[in-house]
Image (cartoon, helix red, strand yellow):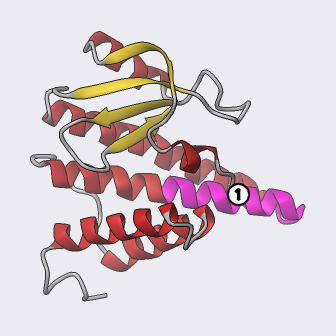
């Protein structure tokens, strides 16, 4: 798709991201649709992640790219598992989701390093999922709109603690409704 070339690449990316967030927040689209539209958009941009992070925009794009793919393939795996068919595809998509989650966490770290961990806050969040309880934490870039990341990576958690940006205790997620909605 060529729609992003007349505007700036990042303008198009951030406008689409904000638009989908608003549509989801207003109840116009479901979480599943939100994930599917994000996936379609990222695929349509036909832009691979940046190898060097020298701006907030590049870091945010990389995070979003990997996060979208991780969630999409995890969603496919769940759909296949629920259907009770094609178990080999379930394992394949689940593995792909896990790999993209790992790449997302690496992209998060790249962005945090670029920002020198300044005005960053991280903490465990309250979740309804038993699987995510005491595992999922939120990372907020305080200087940027809609810059809220999530992870359950232990190695990234250790770095956040060493950098002094992790707050002990649990908080309600800034996007609690989204986090706790199943898809």
Give the total number of marks visible in the rendering. Answer: 1
Question: Badge 1 is on which residue?
Answer: 77
Q: Is residue 27 magenta?
A: no
- The residue at the point 21 percent across, 45 percent down is 144
What range is drawn magenta here? 69-86
Q: Is residue 51 visible?
A: no
Front residue (pair 18, 81): 18
Instruction: Locate the C terminus and report the quarter of the image it occupies.
Output: bottom right
Q: In the figure, is residue 56 to the left or right of 78? A: left
Mark 1 neighbour density, 10 Å: few (under 14) some (14–19) many (20 or more): many
Image: 100 above or below 153: below
Q: In the figure, is residue 54 to the left or right of 25? A: left
Instruction: Locate the N terminus and report the quarter of the image it occupies.
Output: bottom left
Q: Residue furthest left?
A: 54
- The residue at the point 55 percent across, 73 percent down is 28
Front residue (pair 35, 42): 35
Rendering coords of residue 110 (x, y %): 24, 37
Q: Is residue 75 magenta?
A: yes
Predominant SS of the magenta segment = helix
- Could you say whether the residue bearing mark 1 is in a helix, strand or loop? helix
Q: In the figure, is residue 15 to the left or right of 35? A: left
């Amino acid at each position: 798709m060529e729609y992003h070339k007349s505007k700036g690449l990042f303008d198009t990316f951030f406008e689409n991201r904000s638009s989908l967030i608003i549509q989801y927040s207003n109840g116009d689209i479901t979480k599943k649709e939100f994930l599917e539209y994000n996936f379609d958009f990222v695929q349509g941009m036909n832009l691979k992640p940046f190898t060097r992070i020298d701006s907030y925009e590049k870091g945010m794009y990389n995070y979003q790219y990997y996060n979208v793919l991780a969630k999409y393939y995890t969603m496919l795996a769940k759909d296949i598992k629920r259907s009770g068919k094609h178990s080999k595809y379930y394992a394949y998509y689940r593995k792909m989701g896990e790999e993209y989650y790992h790449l997302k966490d690496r992209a998060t770290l790249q962005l945090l390093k670029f920002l020198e961990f300044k005005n960053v806050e991280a903490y465990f969040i309250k979740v309804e999922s038993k699987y995510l309880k005491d595992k999922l934490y939120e990372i907020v870039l305080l200087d940027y709109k809609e810059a809220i990341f999530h992870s359950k990576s232990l190695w990234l958690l250790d770095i956040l603690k060493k950098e002094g940006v992790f707050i002990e205790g649990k908080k309600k997620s800034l996007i609690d409704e989204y986090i706790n909605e199943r898809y």
